[in-house]
Image (cartoon, coloured by chain):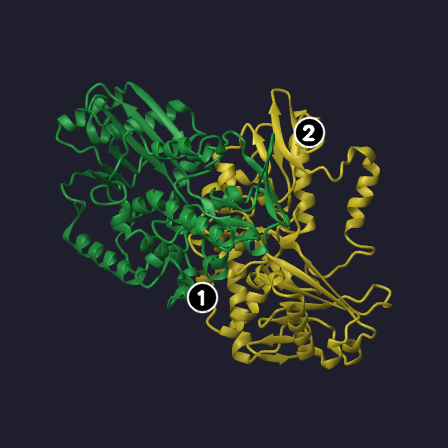
Chain colours: A yellow, B green
């Protein structure tokens, strides 16, 4: 289901229902995006032809030159907001293209069928971390956030409120903004600190509603909604894998997410159920449970799904995204070159950082 | 003296020497800037006509529509770098115009004679803080950086590594990026945290060279240089007020400043003296002392002279620049509405924040 500029329509394939003129322009825009992004290597975006110009402007002004239809802009905005938790005006065009290229393109990153949004884990993605932690046993310390990283001649001390853990090297895998909130002694380089000051997290809120019956399925709908009108930019069927607990899940993203939890709960619920009623009828108001997760309020996330770069940073400071500072190495999905912002990027960056350290041991 | 695109020329008044065509275009650009900025009130920039569009693009792409000469762009870039410690491509056009308006315009902010760069304090600007501190006596605590602000029902605890200071309200006056590195309990709002994630400090390095004789004065020069070629964007005569210690002072700003101290000292000195020789001859190489201050490396500054906003933040989140979070109020020059980024802005914001608290007592 697609909601753009106050109008709801349904579609059966991955291409939303649009006028023929809009479909042709959308296809043209996607082809152009693909042609340009292919030139922007995630391992060295600043050396691409035209990189300086692309990093000197926002995705919004760059896009305005080849997308003229407000409906297409609105649909692309939903994809951009959902992928970055940010608006087109906040992102460097170069960063956007590098990011797209790392994940196979705009459709690959935003689609459920055959795209990045396709799979769910049973019993939840955290199962991977839990299984890894089990193998590592006591080596994993929980509930002791590192406040300071103190480099010595032969090692690094990770200092928390209650204990200090000694190591020969450290790998920091938290998002850049959280890495910037750790104290470093000696201080990291000016270049590194300036980048972490600019690498802001997107904003996203997950909203889950459980129901007695999957009334949308009964009416022949998949439950997937893409909306430029909000507050939910996308909605999916989130019924439990065994089919027993019908549920819808939606995401408030970008600008709207920043002000979301400052509104009263009753207003938030009214806006969410109001949107779901537009798509699926009155029954959407009769939920069993209403749950939200605001990643911006999570102290160890500070936003979701990824950190994004505004114009002017990548061309000036790309080297600092991965360059070690003494015995400190940098992991985390923002430092990946494949599937930046996704679990795969996190794993790739972790392997790369571990490899860097292994070569120094 | 003006250095643009490899060519050094001298000038006697505040308008640098340029071709007549360039002077006319420069005058046109400055008039246009003045006309647009006058509409952008520093107390409510997001409500101005055209604000959305101005906040959706960088100063670089906006300026490209009315400045076509590369020489004029280069001269304006020096002013922008010196005022913000950042490049035109990093700043929101709306933020730039609001900032200009708060300080009387581009010339007012960048000029030495009759402008913001005119005055020096004897015996140094810190004399004001020292005099204030003396009056306050033991109430001023030094060397105990606040790590955490803990709000209670009836007050705020400022927690440092060694002591906790209790108060009924707190005013945070450090730059947004440093405010973001304090831990808050309970956490500040998502909106506030998202803004501090995006409010990055500019980058600037001060370079001071002392000499036996003021050879530039002897040759009839003021010592003032404006250069687009770097590494020093501006140079001033910094001879002591009594004339006894001849000195030149220069500033490395913006992109160049971010990588400055990562280069070997000998390279930095060679580049600085190389530039000064271009302006004042061989004697500039024979300095007595060479001193640098890299504000990006100062743990309680993290950059200079001010925090700047990239596109998309102001229109979405302006309210959070001054909105109290419970018992915590926000001061600091970035939260001012007059002379943002300057000492006057710091004072204005301090008075406003103090007033907010007084009204609650």
Q: Is residue B342 left or right of residue A338?
A: left
- Residue A9 x %, y %: 63, 80
State the residue at coordinates (40%, 64%): B51
Q: Quadrant of the N terminus of chain B?
A: top left
**Residue A342 in view:** yes
- Reply above or below: A127 against A224: above
Q: Nearer the viewer, residue A128 or B137?
A: B137
State the residue at coordinates (27%, 39%): B227
Q: Are the residues flagged by discs 2 and 1 from a single subunit?
A: yes
User: How many marks overall?
Assistant: 2
Q: CA distance from mark 2 to mark 1?
A: 46 Å
The mark nearer the N terminus, 2 or 1, is 1
Mark 2 secondary-structure assignment: helix
Residue extending farthest front: B361
Q: Is residue A48 left or right of residue A206?
A: left
- Reply above or below: B44 against A309: below
Check disc 1 and report the residue beneath it: A64
- Residue A124 x %, y %: 79, 54
Mark 1 secondary-structure assignment: loop
Q: Quadrant of residue B260?
A: top left
Chain of the residue that carries numbered disc 1 in the rendered image: A
Q: Residues within 10 Å of mark 1 (few under 14, many from 20)?
A: few
State the residue at coordinates (20%, 32%): B223
Tag shown at residue B177: none
Q: Residues within 10 Å of mark 2 (few under 14, many from 20)?
A: few
- Reply above or below: A93 against A147: below
**Residue B231 in view:** no
Check disc 2 and report the residue beneath it: A358
- Residue A139 x %, y %: 78, 33
Chain of the residue that carries numbered disc 2 in the rendered image: A
Q: Quadrant of residue B232?
A: top left
Q: Is residue B305 left or right of residue A197?
A: left
């Amino acid at each position: 289901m697609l909601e753009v500029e106050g109008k709801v329509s349904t579609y059966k394939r991955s291409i939303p229902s649009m006028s023929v003129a809009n479909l042709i322009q959308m296809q043209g825009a996607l082809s152009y995006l693909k042609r340009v992004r292919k030139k922007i290597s995630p391992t060295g975006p600043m050396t691409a032809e035209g990189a300086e110009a692309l990093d000197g402007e926002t995705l919004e002004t760059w896009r305005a030159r080849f997308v003229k239809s407000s409906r297409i802009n609105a649909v692309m905005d939903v994809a951009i907001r959902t992928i970055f938790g940010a608006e087109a005006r906040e992102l460097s065009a170069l960063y956007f293209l590098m990011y797209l290229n790392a994940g196979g393109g705009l459709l690959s990153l935003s689609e459920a069928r055959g795209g990045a949004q396709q799979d769910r884990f049973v019993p939840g993605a955290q199962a991977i971390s839990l299984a890894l932690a089990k193998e590592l046993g006591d080596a994993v310390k929980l509930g002791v956030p590192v406040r300071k990283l103190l480099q010595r001649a032969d090692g690094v001390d990770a200092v928390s409120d209650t204990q200090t853990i000694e190591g020969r090297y450290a790998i920091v895998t938290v998002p850049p903004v959280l890495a910037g909130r750790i104290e470093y002694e000696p201080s990291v380089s000016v270049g590194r600190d300036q980048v972490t000051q600019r690498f802001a997290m997107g904003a996203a809120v997950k909203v889950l509603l459980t129901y007695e019956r999957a009334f949308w399925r009964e009416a022949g709908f998949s439950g997937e909604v893409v909306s430029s009108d909000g507050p939910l930019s996308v909605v999916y069927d989130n019924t439990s894998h065994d089919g027993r607990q019908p549920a819808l899940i939606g995401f408030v993203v970008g600008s709207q997410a920043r002000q979301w939890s400052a509104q009263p709960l009753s207003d938030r619920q009214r806006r969410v159920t109001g949107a779901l009623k537009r798509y699926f009828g009155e029954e959407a108001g009769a939920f069993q449970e209403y749950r939200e997760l605001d990643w911006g309020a999570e102290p160890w996330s500070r936003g979701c799904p990824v950190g994004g770069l505004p114009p002017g940073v990548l061309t000036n400071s790309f080297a600092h995204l991965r360059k070690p500072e003494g015995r400190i190495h940098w992991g985390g999905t923002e430092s990946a070159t494949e599937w930046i912002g996704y679990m795969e990027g996190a794993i790739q960056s972790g392997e790369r950082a571990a490899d860097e350290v292994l070569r120094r041991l």
